[in-house]
Amino acid sequence: MNDTGPGVPRIYDLLDLEILRRSKRRRSRIKKGFAAAATRAGLENCTPHVLRHTAAVRMAERRVPMSEIAAMLGHSDSRLTERVYAKYSPEYLKRAAESLRW
C-alpha cells in the first residue's frame, strides 16, 4: 500500500525534519560552548565571526596577499576580500598618498 497522497508525510520528509532538529541542537551546543569559552577568556561580545574578521585583519596588516586571505576565508572571489580588508593593509592607498607629495 502506497500512502504518499496529499497530507501524508513521506519518510524522506520525516528524516529531513529529524536531521534539522539535530542540526539545530548541535548548533545550539556549539554556540553555548563558544560563549562559555569566550567568557572564561575574558572576551566580551565575541563570536566566531568576530574571530574570523580579526584573523583576516591581522593577515592584511602583515601584508599577506589578498588572494591568500580570500582562500583562508573560503571566498570564491578575492574581490570581496579586497573590498572588506584592503584598507587594513599598510600598502592601501600608499601610492595615492605618495602622489600628493610636492
Image: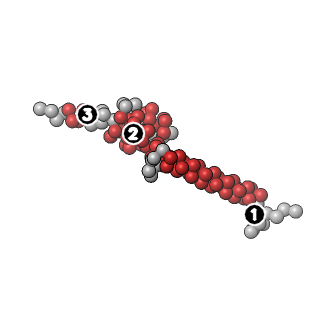
- Mark 2, mark 3: which one is toward the viewer? 2
How many neighbours does mark 2 have within 10 angstroms: few (below 14), some (14-19), or many (20 or more)? Answer: many
* Amino acid type, residue under disc 1 in the picture: Pro
* Amino acid type, residue under disc 3 in the picture: Lys
Seen from the viewer's position, the closer of residues 7 and 47 is 47
Q: What label does residue 94 carry, if any? A: 3
- At a point 67% along the width and 57% down the height, the residue shown is 21
Q: Please give the residue where the numbered disc 2 appears in the rendered image.
A: 57
Seen from the viewer's position, the closer of residues 17 and 52 is 52
- At a point 52% along the width and 50% down the height, the residue shown is 35
Measuring from the top left, give residue 28's x and y in whole percent.
59, 54
Measuring from the top left, give residue 45's x and y in whole percent.
44, 52
Which residue lies most toward the left here?
A: 102
Measuring from the top left, give residue 98's x and y in whole percent.
20, 32
* Amino acid type, residue under disc 2 in the picture: Val
The image quarter containing residue 10 is bottom right
Q: Could you tell me if residue 49 is visible in this image?
A: no
CB within 8 Å, label 1 to label 2: no
- At a point 53% along the width and 46% down the height, the residue shown is 37
Q: What label does residue 9 carry, if any? A: 1
Seen from the viewer's position, the closer of residues 93 and 41 is 41
Q: Earlier in the sequence, mark 2 or mark 3?
A: 2
Label 1 – label 2 distance at C-alpha: 48 Å
